[in-house]
Amino acid sequence: MPRHYTNLDDLAATYDHIYLSPHIDDAALSCGGSIAGFVGAGQSVLVVNICAGSPPPEGPFSPFAQQLHRQWALPPDEAVRRRIQEDIEALETLGADCLLLDALDAIYRMPDAYTGDDTLFGTVAPDDTLADALRGHVAALAARFPAAIFYAPLGVGQHVDHQVTYAAAADLAQRGMSLAFYEDFPYVAKPTALTERMAKIGGAEIFLPSVTNIDATLARKISAVEAYASQIGTLFGDLAAMASSITAYAEGLRPEAGTYGERIWMRR
């Protein structure tokens, strides 16, 4: 039975694959088929949810945070807890363990800097402290699990939390950590989004793509994503649109009609 942890010291003795997930849903959305495939093959998977900390239940919450709470149909004082419950259900479907870090989501961490979509999907604030804290966590994980393959978001879509996670992982990869970058879904499904991000971080001169076949696990991925009920409306509109979007993008990554994939990128 997959487990959710809050302390690094309590984790299992070993993991084959460790996914750095900026938010409570990113790993399943982007890599759920691969995760389910690894678990089905008898390999162990840990998802590290980075921005899983809870703000004070009484707030105060910025107008932008309040807007998102309304979109998610979640009470402000329970928003993070409810999303963690969704994650427990999703990762049980995929078979992965989870480590919950206590960093705050950007909308709670720096409400005066990230005031709307234009700033949340923009330049990381110069005084944002997430990067320093995250480097420490990732370094500790790499030291604890030196044989694991780590996966981090490319930062497609430019969400600030995704950009910070990419940068922290890329910095530590220079110390020998085995690392691949996954495509941030659903942002990567937007035309030109991947091209624009690759232009910022080096493109084909630096990265090589690899597509994993998820024919056998696509349905399980979609079932797992269904658990994130609070996010479906904002990201897709409804469950049918979610399943259609995931299926269409996965099919577009495979050269043969009727087959499905997920893509990662590795430094040359």
Image (cartoon, rainbow, N blue to C red):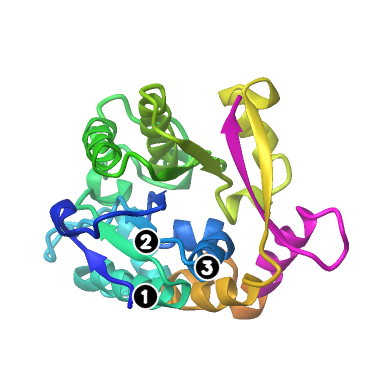
- The amino acid beneath tag 2 is Ile
Q: Residue furthest right?
A: 257
Q: Amino acid at mark 3?
A: Ala
Question: What is the magenta range?
Answer: 243-268
Where on the picture, by quarter, is residue 11? bottom left
Which one is closest to the eye, mark 3 or mark 1? 3
Q: Locate residue 190 relative to residue 200 in the image: left or right.
A: right
Q: Position of residue 184 (x, y in %)?
A: 55, 49
Amino acid carrying label 1: it is Glu
Q: N-terminal of the two: label 3 or label 1?
A: 3
Q: Which mark is residue 86?
A: 1
Residue 114, percent across and down?
A: 35, 42
Residue to which mark 2 is pinned: 24
Q: Which corner quadrant holds the N terminus? A: bottom left
Give the residue drawn at x 22%, y 38%: 140
The answer to whether mark 3 and mark 2 are in CB contact below 8 A is no
